[in-house]
Image: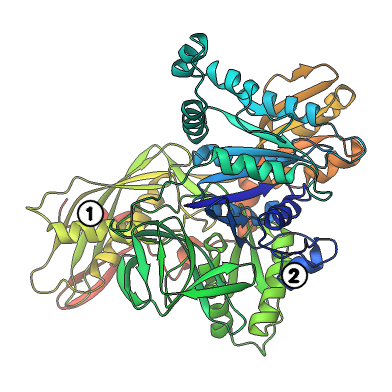
Amino acid sequence: MNKVIGIAAHVDAGKTTLSEALMYHSSTIRTKGRVDHQNSHLDTHPLEKERGITIFTDQAILNYQGDQYFLLDTPGHVDFSPEMERTLKVLDYLIIVVSAVEGIESHTEKVWELAAKENLPVFFFINKCDRKGASASRTLAELKEEFSQNIFIFQDLKNEVITADLIEFAAERNEKLFELYLAEKIDSEIFLAEIKKMIKKREIFTAASGSALNDQGVKEFLRELSVLTASFYQDQDKNDFKALLYKISHDQNQNRISHLKILSGSLKVRAELEYQKQGETLKEKITELRLYNGQEYQTVDQVKAGQIAGVLGLSEAPAGTTFGGLESLASYQQQTALKSKVIYGEEINTRKLLQAFKILEAEDPSLNVNWDSKAKEIQINVMGTIQLEILQSLLRERFNYKVDFAQPDIIYKETIRGQVRGYGHFEPLKHYAEVHLKIEAAPRNSGIVFCNQASTDDLSRGLQNLVGQHLLEKEHRGILTGSPLTDLKITLLTGRAHNKHTSGGDFKEATLRALRQGLEKADNQLLEPFYSFKIKVELDHLGRVISDIEKAKGSFESPEIKEDKAIIRGQAPVATFMDYPVELRTFTGGRGIINLKFSGYDSCHNSEQIIKSSSYDKDKDPEYSSASVFCAKGKGYTVAWEQAESEMHLL
């Protein structure tokens, strides 16, 4: 039976060390490697060995007690959260490793929240119990307080997993088991089957403790996983093929490897896969299937549901692509709030460098690579400076490009207050299109929503859909700073085409001019990214923290006092708070804990300053014009947005 299990944790909690120990006890490897010795079997990339952190999700295949486990070791550093989040989408179960010394840390909370979002059942391993200052009981109490009261910890797994304590714990939380328990009808098989269901439904969670480095409790934890997890892929060979591409990598020969989780059915070599990319249907033939175990792999002719395979032959599909008619699964919480400019010398061909970045973007869609035609520069979205250092190394090693990056800037966005109507007309000689839009402010962080109220008496359904496509196919710029537009509901009211003269991009021109003309009349608003935060400090530091939040233009709820600690929750702009974790760690002597989570966009606290510093000239943007083009006496002429309405054909 196939089971896909991931391991995640805050950096340096011992995640990769636990992976090595699980591989050892399942006889996957003969000797355990160590991160600090640069010989671990999963952190194999030179950059991972050099820095001692997991950067890329790596896979091991474990065979234990008749089951096959696909074990995925995910990155622990916050800068590589998008890769971790993409991996969570293909898991059946997740192991969260928590240090018994440091307890819950900021990234631990983030992993827990993402697991809840993906409805993933979770096992906890409380690690480093052999270290000075460690306390498994204190860490368990913290897990229960912060995450769930329904966590059961195994005190002794040397004999059996379904212990009397676990039976009692489950019975207290399950009506069926409670009745059997009261009637003293305790059948281990019935209880085990029901406990498995409860774990899968996230009704209960289990935890074990030990030391992965010194091999304490790992063998017992593996047995726990074997007994309490189930496979969901039996008898699915005849089902329709469905799969999710969660990761792209390249081997030593620069072959593109698409890592697929097979969700149902099976996939054979030489089969053709059909998928969607930017609205286009593509079909490609599979040339090779690989089952990876660290750096090593074996080629196979077929893979089945519940397996993860390295697939060769998919040259265009980016990470997040689905196969078999699945709805898109590429909605991610770990959005970037920073962008950086690529700095490179004249000896590097810009077009080829941009192609290299597009390859990296296919591997990590959160990069959102953009060529700014006005500034003549390549821009990328990033999580932080460590990610930039890794990208710099990747470009040098894989593409032989030496580049630098500018200090990351905040990504601002724009929206409007209230509502307006925008009109666009495009009629140079032998062209014709007119579009009328209603543009309304939408709820925060809702993005761009397209609605259609046009009648087919005025505009064919195909052209109506084309207007929606042009509004949604890419980000559009606002008129304050040229930042991306968001939080708008745009409704097509009506439009007109010409039987003879409407062609090609006429409706794109009319649509964008209508959007821009509406923005010219609107009450435009600049938005900035915000963090939601949770800060835990000793009471002596509470006053300082509150003062810092106020100076950063943040807001907070009433502090929660627990013994000698204070917990403060609130929101603050990324621009003013992004460096605060370092400051907090300094003045609390490392005892203060902060969890920052990107929480979306809201009103910018210093709009005038940002608008002035952007130097964006809305009238000189080559991609956008708010004017309309009309035709008279066989010649096209331009009408400024202020006068355009008076000449619209449908008004």
Q: Mark 1 belongs to which amino acid? A: Ser
Q: Is residue 125 above or below residue 511?
A: above
Name the quadrant containing residue 434: bottom left
Q: Give the farthest residue toward the bottom.
A: 347
Query: Which numbered marker is on residue 146?
Result: none
Q: Nearer the viewer, residue 374 or 102?
A: 102
Answer with left or right where residue 411 lies relative to residue 438: right
Q: Position of residue 633 (x, y in %)?
A: 14, 76
Callout 2: SS: helix
Q: Is residue 453 above or below residue 375?
A: above
Query: Which numbered marker is on residue 646?
Result: 1
Q: Is residue 457 visible?
A: yes
Residue occupying image coordinates x 50% and y 46%? 92
Q: Is residue 46 above or below residue 201?
A: below
Q: How many marks?
A: 2
Answer with left or right where residue 487 lies relative to residue 517: right
Residue occupying image coordinates x 42% and y 52%? 329
Q: Position of residue 441 (x, y in %)?
A: 40, 40
Answer with left or right where residue 140 lies relative to residue 58: right
Residue assigned mark 2: 47
Q: Is residue 94 above or below residue 250?
A: above
Q: Position of residue 512 (x, y in %)?
A: 33, 61
Residue occupying image coordinates x 22% and y 54%? 646
Callout 1: SS: helix
